[in-house]
Amino acid sequence: MITSAERREVIRRVTGLLPGPRDDLCTRVGIDGPDGSGKSTFADELAAELRASGRPVVRISLDSFHNPRAVRYQRGRESPEGFWRHAFDYPRFRADVLDPFGPGGTRLYRKAALDLATDTPLDPEPLVAPPAAVLVVDGLFLHRDELVTAWDLTVFLDVPFAETARRMAARDGTPPDPEHPGVRRYTDAQRIYFDVCHPQHRADVHIDNRDLGAPRIMRP
């Protein structure tokens, strides 16, 4: 999973910034960044490092908490503003994930709210997180005002849109030009996010992840 000494060192440095085990209190970690920045991979690597150190980990993706299509596309299927405002069900995400892992939380959580492929709402039986678990979440827009105070540590993976579009094209077959009409809904929504929330500054850790083999911690 971790492919270079440089990358392994970055993961270790981020792991070292997490609060240590605090009785039964859980720790909530958010991995943010634009589409194609490497959030899922980074979160998986961080989770693996934590498990190797003996800490219990719960891995969840915000992608499992999309709103249904009728909500996501209420401003049209190509609207960046619509994607920024309506892509994700933040009240459900807080209720099912963030609050249960917070101070005084029940540790009863659900991993998903929607089957994105079929647009089917989900209401699975809750799972029980171990005491002092570390919740590791990857997703877009994790430094929104609705979420920013819920994290114990956040990481923002900074990658230029030209590079993220190239990665998305290789992965998903989307256009490799970030200004192409087929991807402008997403890139422009993320530009709105940057302008409104400044996640590069709100994040506890700001990482240049354009070179997957040699990411660089820019702050702290």
Image: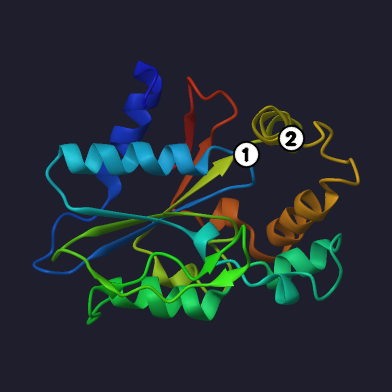
| Residue 106 at x, y percent in the picture | 23, 80
Under mark 1, the amino acid is Gly
Q: Can you name the residue that lies furthest to the right here?
A: 181
- Compared across the picture, whether 28 is left or right of 181 comes to left
Q: Which mark is residue 165?
A: 2
Left or right side of 72 for 89: left
Left or right of 93 on screen, residue 19: left
Please, which colouring scheme is shown?
A: rainbow
| Residue 12 appears left or right of 148 | left
Q: Would residue 114 be seen by someone viewing this image from the given angle?
A: yes
Task: Report which quarter residue 162 is drawn in.
Answer: top right
Q: Quadrant of the C terminus?
A: top left
Image disc number at residue 220: none
Image quarter for residue 52? Answer: top left
The residue depicted at 48 percent of the width and 21 percent of the height is 214
Look at mark 1 in the image and give the residue it sits on. Answer: 36
Is the residue under label 2 in contact with that under label 1 (CB below 8 Å)? yes
- Give coordinates of residue 55: x percent, y percent: 15, 49
